[in-house]
Image (cartoon, rainbow, N blue to C red):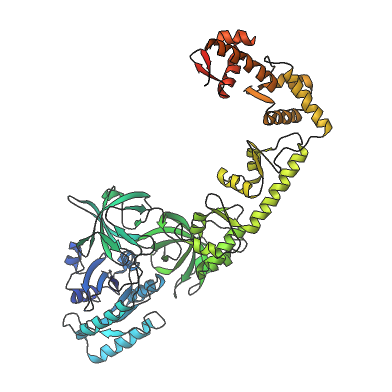
């Protein structure tokens, strides 16, 4: 679907306490965004409030009204993540105040890039005072995303300036473009409550993707899949909600106490809670310096967690500077690449900076080669170079979904970047590696296998598990086998080698093989253990084991049980005797067949079980009959 203008635009408020944010929203929408009894009693906004209205064009506006008191900054931050634009509100009778400045910094750090500045309560001051406040507000927004935005004067009580404000909101709404059908669903939760007869309900701004009734979503970082029982947008039941809408979601499969503000509803498998995050951190003007290991509050989406900051460029970060750092969170946050976050001092709590997430879930060492360049590419969005770097520096093939994770993408979205990496080498099971790395591995594998077989010339090949341990430890078996096949290495049951058939034996080795084989053949159907034969023949242990393996591979020995084998000649003789008896009698007991073979019961049972495995005979209680 093409980008549409019929989907709502989310407008947030910001500004100091008692500067008229809620009154302004009510003047625009006719709705009181203060919903809590305590808010109505005290006359101040404590938590997020919501309202909505249609514009003359038919475009819908959804308002998020945030608290202005410094004690409720965490609630204000929870409302910023879903804003398409903001109304920075400054009261004419007070002018720029501390939370005006802090809210403006928070909006910038969390990625808000559109909005208007509104001076409210204009009827409470004279023209001279109003002109002074306008000048002070212009100075405050200078150098920010609101520098060139309109500065409007309104009075919500008298209605002064409301029509021009609506016209500017229409312009803002027309500039918001959103492709509502792309991306995984993601809804940070800002309210949780229960409704009698319906159960658990959560609300939030759907920041990407879409959610439909009866589909499954995952609550992150809770890690539980739940079902969407019902949806409402602006108090109207809908079958589907789209990116940009304020949504109430009735959930099945989760109790109210199990889910909280800060959790995220997401398409299953597309988001996870992480405790290790690489970011680019920027400190705002006036912030104290951040030193290595300092403890801070991290806000992202509607959630927050304590964390420690570890610097990778020096040991101290000064106000106004930015640097790559690692945040080690004390509780998981649902984060991915490009997410904005806010950092506040541990105590006393105030805003010191913020930035964007570059990488999640991967720990790095400070001296790691190429790390800062890797993070720069993540920051600058150079996914092709990042993917090429990942493949080139990987010690083993990477799963495509791991590459997606490192690029901050949903599994399956990495294909475009990989397709533009000329050196990408695709292997079985959805694994990818750099072609040069794979070719070096093949050379090492073939060289190692050749050296092994030259040292063990009697052996029919290298045991595949031994090869895996030596050349591909921790590789999935399917990946290892696929890589061997691509390398042209031959499988022969549990052995691998370079040629279709085992190498020809030198005369001395051939004589040893025949000596061992003859010793086992001479015992017929009454073999000694392989250990006893080994001791009697006084062959070196490694050589004896290799000879036995080769004889098994060639089919000249057959295994009765571990450590006990008979020659092919003895097997054929015993088989022919058993087949002759059973053809004559139809069925015979183990005792009868034991006499035919001329061996004890234990050896007879082992030999008959071998015939069963070879599908010559079939067991019926204590008797045997021929198969077919």
**Relative to 150, is 567 on the left or the right?**
right
Q: Quadrant of residue 298?
A: bottom left
Task: Pick the residue in front: 396 or 577.
Answer: 577
Q: Is residue 15 above or below residue 495?
A: below
Among all residues in the image, which is located at the extreme right? 508
Query: x and y percent of residue 428 in the render?
Result: 55, 50
State whether residue 128 appears in this view. Answer: yes
**Relative to 414, is 178 on the left or the right?**
left
Residue pictured at 30% horizontal, 53% vertical = 215
Query: x and y percent of residue 160 in the render?
Result: 19, 85
Query: x and y percent of residue 155 in the render?
Result: 20, 82
**Relative to 628, is 491 on the left or the right?**
right
Q: Is residue 326 above or below residue 617?
A: below
State whether residue 311 appears in this view. Answer: no
Q: Is residue 40 above or below residue 222?
A: below
Q: Is residue 266 above or below residue 558?
A: below
Q: Quadrant of residue 121?
A: bottom left
């Amino acid at each position: 679907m093409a980008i549409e203008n019929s989907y709502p635009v989310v407008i947030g408020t910001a500004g100091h306490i008692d500067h008229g944010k809620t009154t302004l929203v009510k003047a625009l929408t006719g709705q009181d965004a203060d919903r809590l009894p305590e808010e109505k009693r005290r006359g101040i906004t404590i938590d997020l409030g919501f309202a909505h209205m249609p514009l003359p064009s038919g475009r819908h506006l959804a308002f998020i009204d945030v608290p202005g008191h410094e004690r409720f900054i965490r609630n204000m931050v929870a409302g910023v993540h879903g804003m398409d634009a903001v109304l920075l509100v400054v009261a004419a009778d007070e002018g720029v105040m501390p939370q005006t400045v802090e809210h403006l910094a928070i909006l910038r750090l969390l990625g808000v890039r559109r909005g208007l500045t509104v001076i409210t309560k204009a009827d409470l001051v004279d023209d001279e005072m109003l002109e002074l406040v306008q000048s002070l507000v212009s100075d405050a927004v200078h150098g920010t995303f609101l520098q060139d935005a309109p500065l409007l004067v309104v009075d919500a009580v008298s209605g002064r300036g409301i029509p021009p404000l609506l016209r500017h909101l229409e312009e803002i709404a027309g500039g918001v473009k959103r492709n509502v059908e792309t991306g995984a669903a993601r809804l940070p939760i800002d309210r949780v409550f229960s409704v009698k007869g319906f159960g658990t309900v959560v609300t939030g701004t759907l920041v990407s993707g879409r959610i439909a009734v009866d589909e499954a979503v995952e609550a992150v970082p809770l890690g539980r899949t739940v079902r969407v029982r019902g949806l409402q947008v602006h108090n109207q039941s809908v079958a589907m909600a789209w990116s940009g809408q304020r949504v109430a979601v009735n959930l099945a499969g989760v109790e109210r106490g199990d889910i909280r503000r800060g959790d995220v509803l997401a398409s299953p498998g597309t988001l996870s809670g992480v405790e290790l995050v690489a970011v680019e951190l920027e400190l705002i003007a006036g912030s104290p310096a951040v030193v290595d290991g300092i403890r801070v509050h991290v806000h992202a989406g509607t959630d927050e967690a304590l964390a420690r900051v570890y610097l990778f460029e020096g040991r101290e970060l000064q106000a106004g500077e930015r640097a790559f750092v690692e945040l080690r969170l004390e509780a998981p946050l649902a984060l991915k690449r490009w997410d904005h976050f806010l950092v506040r001092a541990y105590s006393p709590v105030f805003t010191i900076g913020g930035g964007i997430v570059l990488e999640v879930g991967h720990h790095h060492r400070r001296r790691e080669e190429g790390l800062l360049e890797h993070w720069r590419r993540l920051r600058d969005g150079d996914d092709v170079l990042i993917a090429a770097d990942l493949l080139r520096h990987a010690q083993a093939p990477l799963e495509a979904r791991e590459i997606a994770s490192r690029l901050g993408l949903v599994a399956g979205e990495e294909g475009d970047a990989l397709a533009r990496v000329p050196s990408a080498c695709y292997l079985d099971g959805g694994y990818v590696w750099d072609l040069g790395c794979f070719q070096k591995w093949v050379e090492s594998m073939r060289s190692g296998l050749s050296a092994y077989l030259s040292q063990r010339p009697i052996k029919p090949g290298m045991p595949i598990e031994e090869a895996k341990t030596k050349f591909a430890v921790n590789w999935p078996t399917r990946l290892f086998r696929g890589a061997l096949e691509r390398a042209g290495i031959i499988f022969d049951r549990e052995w691998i080698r370079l040629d279709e058939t085992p190498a020809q034996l030198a005369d001395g080795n051939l004589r040893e093989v025949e000596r061992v084989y003859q010793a086992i053949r001479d015992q017929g159907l009454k073999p000694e253990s392989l250990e006893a034969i080994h001791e009697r023949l006084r062959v070196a242990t490694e050589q004896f084991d290799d000879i036995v393996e080769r004889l098994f591979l060639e089919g000249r020995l057959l295994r009765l049980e571990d450590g006990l084998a008979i020659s092919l000649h003895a097997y054929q003789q015993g088989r022919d005797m058993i087949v002759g008896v059973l053809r004559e009698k139809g069925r015979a007991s183990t005792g009868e067949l034991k006499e035919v073979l001329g061996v004890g019961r234990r050896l007879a049972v082992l030999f008959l079980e071998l015939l069963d495995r070879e599908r010559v005979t079939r067991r019926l209680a204590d008797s045997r009959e021929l198969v077919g």
